[in-house]
Structures are given as C-alpha cells and as structure tokens.
Image: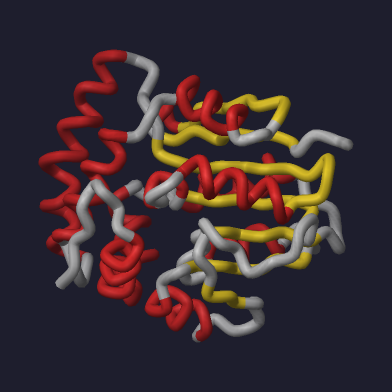
Amino acid sequence: MSRAGLDKKPREVAAMFDDVARRYDLTNTVLSFGQDRRWRALTRRALDLAPGERVLDLAAGSGVSTEEFARSGAWCVAADFSLGMLGVGRERGGLPLVAADALHLPFADESFDAVTISFGLRNLVDTALGLREMLRVVRPGGRLVVCEFSTPTWTPFRVVYLNYLMRALPAVARAVSSNPDAYVYLAESIREWPDQPALADRISVAGWRDVAWRNLTGGIVALHRARKPLP
C-alpha cells in the first residue's frame, strides 16, 4: 500500500489515492461524523452557480462533490489525477470525468465560469502554480471556491482536534479504509497546512481578488472565495 510523504511527489500522491479509492467516500463520511455532506452543500452555495454555467471541480476524486454542484443546473466537469478515483466515479455515470494534472490543466484559457477544489489544494506539490492554473482557465470575473481543512479558531478545541488527527484518525481509518497508512499522511498534511489568513494571502498572491473566507465546524474547514479580476 502507498503512503505519500509531505514532499507531495505527484506520482506518490496519485498512487496513494488509487489505493484508497474504493472506500474513500465512505471513510471520509465516518471520519468527519457525516459533516462532509454539509461541507459539500455549503461549497455549492458559495459557488453561487446559475443553470448553464461551466464549472471545473478539481481534485474531484470519485465525483461525489461534482454531483452536489450539478444540482444547481450548472455543467460540471470532474477532474482528478488519480485514475483509481476516476474509475470509481465512472460507476456513478452521467458525469464528465477528465484525468488532469492540476499544475498543467488540459483546458483552454477562460473555459469556465467557476472553479472549485475540495480537500485537494494541500496535496499539490506547488500550491501557487495550481492557483495560477485555476486562474488561467476561469473567465474574467469568474469565481474560485476552495474548501479545505484549516485551523480551529478556539484554542481548547484546536488542541482536542489536533490530538484526534494524529491519534484517533489513523485508528478509525484502520477500521474502514483500504489503506489506513494513507490517513497518517492526510493527518500530517492537515497539521502542516497554513491557517485561514495565510491561505488567503496565497490566493491573493496568485492573482485572485476579493479574497474572503468562512469558517465551518469551528474552523476545522474553511471556505475561501475569490474572483478573477476583470481586464
């Protein structure tokens, strides 16, 4: 079984997600105590999609998030670099699925009205390049929504949460995941990830404007929103 390191070599990260693909969505629901469904719904609302708009769901995995966004009537494309995850998504049917490297997206400039990435930005070996690629494929005035693990805002809760990440999370993953060692990496990557203001700065430096965020579940997750500048 594969476990990626915090150097986030793309081939290792893709292989790790291939290993966990079959039970990935179930494991996430168990580990988040069902909060993952609420996070997806709130991400859809933050995108503020209109029927017929074109949306890129990056690091979409099996497409469970893409299905949620498509409820708005928008045309949604699920893109991921894990063929194992896309294989699971193919079983759902009805979703456009694209194998894609987030650092070299196979889409023309200004192809989408919005782009979103859920729990995938921190797995990129070059976050800045990934954010610039997302900017490239979105039309001027288009939107970005990043749903990602973040830093709980209440200190006592933050301490409990970090202990859960490093101790309880791998133990729970052993009961439900096909590759529990992968969740050790996931826990470590969450701990190393920047907090809400620091991620907002990264998004702004990449060229996005009007960056703001909303904390979910006490800051365990944050929704960062931004727009591509008009010419």
In which quadrant will I find the C terminus?
top right
Colour mapping used in the image: secondary structure
In which quadrant will I find the N terminus?
bottom left
Q: Residue furthest top?
A: 155
Q: Residue at x 59, y 29 (%)?
A: 205
Is residue 202 placed above or below 111 in the rendered structure? above
* Residue 95 placement (x, y as % from top left): 64, 77
Question: In the rendered image, which quarter is residue 178 located in?
Answer: bottom left
Q: Answer left or right for 104 relative to 168.
A: right
Question: In the rendered image, which quarter is residue 163 located in?
Answer: top left
Is there any visible trace of residue 126 in the rendered image? yes
Q: Residue at x 80, y 63 (%)?
A: 73
Q: Residue at x 37, y 26 (%)?
A: 151
Q: Answer left or right for 183 relative to 217.
A: left
Q: Residue at x 32, y 74 (%)?
A: 18
Is residue 227 placed above or below 94 in the rendered structure? above
* Residue 170 placement (x, y as % from top left): 15, 51
* Residue 161 placement (x, y as % from top left): 25, 30
Q: Answer left or right for 94 relative to 196.
A: right
Is there any visible trace of residue 218 in the rendered image? no
Disc count in the image?
A: 0
